[in-house]
Image: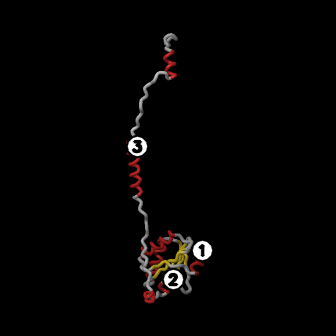
Amino acid sequence: MLPSLKDIEVDRIHSAATGSETREKRKVSVDMNPMVDLAFLLLTFFMLATTFIKPQAMELLVPAKPKMDDVEKETPIKESKTLHLILLESRLAWYKGITDPEPVMMPFDDKKMTSLVVKIMAETEGLVVLIKPLDESTYEHLVQVLDVMTVTGIDRYALDTPSEFDKSLGEFEK
Protein backbone atom coordinates (compact mmCIF):
# COMPACT_ATOMS: atom_id res chain seq x y z
CA MET A 1 0.00 0.00 0.00
CA LEU A 2 1.10 3.54 -0.67
CA PRO A 3 1.87 5.94 2.13
CA SER A 4 -0.34 8.92 2.57
CA LEU A 5 0.85 12.39 1.66
CA LYS A 6 1.13 13.34 5.31
CA ASP A 7 3.62 10.59 5.96
CA ILE A 8 6.00 11.64 3.17
CA GLU A 9 8.83 13.91 4.33
CA VAL A 10 9.04 16.39 1.47
CA ASP A 11 11.75 18.55 3.08
CA ARG A 12 14.09 15.63 3.35
CA ILE A 13 13.65 14.73 -0.34
CA HIS A 14 14.26 18.32 -1.48
CA SER A 15 17.33 18.72 0.67
CA ALA A 16 18.86 15.55 -0.80
CA ALA A 17 18.13 16.74 -4.34
CA THR A 18 19.69 20.16 -3.79
CA GLY A 19 22.70 18.77 -2.00
CA SER A 20 22.26 20.67 1.21
CA GLU A 21 23.22 17.62 3.17
CA THR A 22 26.88 16.90 2.75
CA ARG A 23 27.63 13.31 2.11
CA GLU A 24 30.89 11.85 3.03
CA LYS A 25 32.62 10.84 -0.22
CA ARG A 26 34.80 7.81 -0.30
CA LYS A 27 38.24 8.19 -1.79
CA VAL A 28 38.93 5.67 -4.53
CA SER A 29 42.47 4.39 -4.72
CA VAL A 30 43.55 2.25 -7.66
CA ASP A 31 46.52 0.01 -7.10
CA MET A 32 48.79 0.43 -10.17
CA ASN A 33 51.30 -2.28 -9.20
CA PRO A 34 49.62 -5.13 -11.13
CA MET A 35 49.39 -3.01 -14.29
CA VAL A 36 53.07 -2.04 -14.07
CA ASP A 37 53.99 -5.69 -13.51
CA LEU A 38 51.98 -6.70 -16.58
CA ALA A 39 53.62 -3.98 -18.70
CA PHE A 40 57.10 -5.17 -17.74
CA LEU A 41 56.19 -8.80 -18.37
CA LEU A 42 54.93 -7.92 -21.86
CA LEU A 43 58.00 -5.81 -22.55
CA THR A 44 60.29 -8.64 -21.45
CA PHE A 45 58.40 -11.17 -23.57
CA PHE A 46 58.60 -9.07 -26.73
CA MET A 47 62.29 -8.34 -26.21
CA LEU A 48 63.04 -12.05 -25.85
CA ALA A 49 60.79 -13.04 -28.76
CA THR A 50 62.63 -10.73 -31.17
CA THR A 51 65.96 -12.44 -30.50
CA PHE A 52 64.62 -15.82 -31.69
CA ILE A 53 64.73 -14.68 -35.32
CA LYS A 54 68.31 -14.66 -36.51
CA PRO A 55 69.27 -13.08 -39.82
CA GLN A 56 70.23 -15.57 -42.49
CA ALA A 57 73.39 -14.73 -44.34
CA MET A 58 75.30 -16.60 -46.97
CA GLU A 59 79.02 -16.85 -46.46
CA LEU A 60 81.06 -16.09 -49.56
CA LEU A 61 84.78 -16.56 -49.67
CA VAL A 62 86.24 -13.79 -51.77
CA PRO A 63 89.85 -14.17 -52.85
CA ALA A 64 92.37 -11.47 -52.05
CA LYS A 65 93.29 -9.02 -54.77
CA PRO A 66 96.28 -10.48 -56.62
CA LYS A 67 99.57 -8.63 -56.82
CA MET A 68 100.95 -7.69 -60.23
CA ASP A 69 103.63 -10.41 -59.99
CA ASP A 70 100.97 -13.06 -59.32
CA VAL A 71 98.91 -12.08 -62.36
CA GLU A 72 101.76 -13.07 -64.65
CA LYS A 73 102.05 -16.45 -62.89
CA GLU A 74 98.37 -17.37 -63.37
CA THR A 75 97.78 -20.33 -65.59
CA PRO A 76 95.22 -19.72 -68.31
CA ILE A 77 92.10 -21.84 -68.35
CA LYS A 78 91.29 -23.86 -71.43
CA GLU A 79 88.18 -22.72 -73.25
CA SER A 80 86.81 -26.27 -73.31
CA LYS A 81 86.88 -26.42 -69.48
CA THR A 82 84.59 -23.41 -68.94
CA LEU A 83 80.85 -23.48 -68.35
CA HIS A 84 79.01 -20.16 -68.61
CA LEU A 85 75.76 -19.72 -66.66
CA ILE A 86 73.86 -16.56 -67.63
CA LEU A 87 71.11 -15.59 -65.22
CA LEU A 88 68.27 -14.08 -67.23
CA GLU A 89 65.08 -12.62 -65.82
CA SER A 90 63.05 -15.84 -65.73
CA ARG A 91 65.36 -18.52 -67.17
CA LEU A 92 68.92 -19.75 -67.10
CA ALA A 93 71.05 -19.84 -70.25
CA TRP A 94 74.23 -21.92 -70.39
CA TYR A 95 76.93 -22.75 -72.88
CA LYS A 96 80.40 -24.28 -72.94
CA GLY A 97 83.48 -22.56 -74.31
CA ILE A 98 83.79 -19.12 -75.85
CA THR A 99 84.20 -19.65 -79.57
CA ASP A 100 80.87 -20.13 -81.37
CA PRO A 101 78.79 -20.74 -78.24
CA GLU A 102 75.46 -22.51 -78.60
CA PRO A 103 73.33 -21.30 -75.67
CA VAL A 104 70.70 -23.57 -74.17
CA MET A 105 67.78 -22.12 -72.19
CA MET A 106 66.35 -23.87 -69.14
CA PRO A 107 64.10 -22.92 -66.19
CA PHE A 108 65.44 -22.16 -62.72
CA ASP A 109 64.89 -25.64 -61.31
CA ASP A 110 67.31 -26.95 -58.69
CA LYS A 111 67.11 -30.56 -59.85
CA LYS A 112 67.66 -29.74 -63.52
CA MET A 113 70.54 -27.37 -62.76
CA THR A 114 72.16 -29.92 -60.46
CA SER A 115 71.89 -32.71 -63.01
CA LEU A 116 73.29 -30.41 -65.73
CA VAL A 117 76.32 -29.43 -63.65
CA VAL A 118 76.96 -33.02 -62.53
CA LYS A 119 76.77 -34.24 -66.15
CA ILE A 120 79.16 -31.57 -67.44
CA MET A 121 81.47 -32.07 -64.45
CA ALA A 122 81.70 -35.79 -65.25
CA GLU A 123 82.57 -35.00 -68.88
CA THR A 124 85.10 -32.25 -68.12
CA GLU A 125 88.02 -32.56 -65.73
CA GLY A 126 88.93 -29.32 -63.96
CA LEU A 127 85.64 -27.56 -64.79
CA VAL A 128 85.42 -23.81 -64.12
CA VAL A 129 81.94 -22.28 -63.91
CA LEU A 130 81.44 -18.61 -64.77
CA ILE A 131 78.21 -17.23 -63.30
CA LYS A 132 77.03 -14.11 -65.12
CA PRO A 133 73.96 -12.39 -63.67
CA LEU A 134 72.28 -9.82 -65.90
CA ASP A 135 70.68 -6.65 -64.56
CA GLU A 136 67.20 -8.19 -64.86
CA SER A 137 68.05 -11.29 -62.83
CA THR A 138 67.01 -11.61 -59.22
CA TYR A 139 69.04 -12.23 -56.10
CA GLU A 140 67.00 -15.37 -55.42
CA HIS A 141 68.20 -16.93 -58.68
CA LEU A 142 71.82 -16.11 -57.86
CA VAL A 143 71.50 -17.79 -54.47
CA GLN A 144 69.88 -20.78 -56.17
CA VAL A 145 72.83 -21.15 -58.56
CA LEU A 146 75.36 -20.73 -55.72
CA ASP A 147 73.52 -23.46 -53.77
CA VAL A 148 73.82 -25.76 -56.80
CA MET A 149 77.59 -25.08 -56.86
CA THR A 150 77.81 -26.10 -53.20
CA VAL A 151 75.66 -29.21 -53.62
CA THR A 152 77.55 -30.46 -56.66
CA GLY A 153 80.96 -29.78 -55.10
CA ILE A 154 82.27 -27.41 -57.78
CA ASP A 155 85.46 -25.94 -56.36
CA ARG A 156 86.16 -23.39 -59.06
CA TYR A 157 83.43 -20.93 -59.89
CA ALA A 158 83.35 -17.17 -60.21
CA LEU A 159 80.92 -14.32 -60.64
CA ASP A 160 81.74 -12.56 -63.88
CA THR A 161 80.43 -9.59 -65.83
CA PRO A 162 78.29 -10.58 -68.80
CA SER A 163 79.70 -10.10 -72.29
CA GLU A 164 77.83 -8.48 -75.16
CA PHE A 165 76.81 -11.95 -76.35
CA ASP A 166 75.39 -12.72 -72.89
CA LYS A 167 73.44 -9.45 -72.85
CA SER A 168 71.99 -10.28 -76.25
CA LEU A 169 70.56 -13.47 -74.74
CA GLY A 170 68.69 -11.31 -72.23
CA GLU A 171 67.21 -9.24 -75.07
CA PHE A 172 66.29 -12.46 -76.91
CA GLU A 173 64.26 -13.59 -73.89
CA LYS A 174 62.09 -10.46 -73.95
Element at label 1? helix
Quadrant where the image shows the C terminus = bottom right
The amino acid type of the residue labelled 3 equals Met
- In the image, is 141 to the left or to the right of 32? right
Q: Residue 94, position in %: x, y? A: 52, 78
Viewer-side residue, 48 vs 98: 48
- Mark 2 or mark 3, which is nearer the start of the sequence? 3
Residue matched to label 3: 35
The amino acid type of the residue labelled 2 equals Lys
Q: Residue at x 47, y 79 (%)?
A: 158
Q: Residue 16, position in %: x, y? A: 49, 21
- In the image, is 103 to the left or to the right of 157? right
Instruction: Give the total of numbered labels.
Output: 3
Residue furthest bottom as drawn: 72
Residue 64 position (above or below residue 16) = below
Element at label 3? helix
Element at label 2? strand
Residue 87 position (above or below residue 15) = below
Q: Cβ–Cβ below 8 Å for labels 1 and 2?
A: no
- Mark 3 or mark 1, which is nearer the start of the sequence? 3
Residue matched to label 2: 96
Residue matched to label 1: 173
Q: Residue 105, position in %: x, y? A: 55, 76
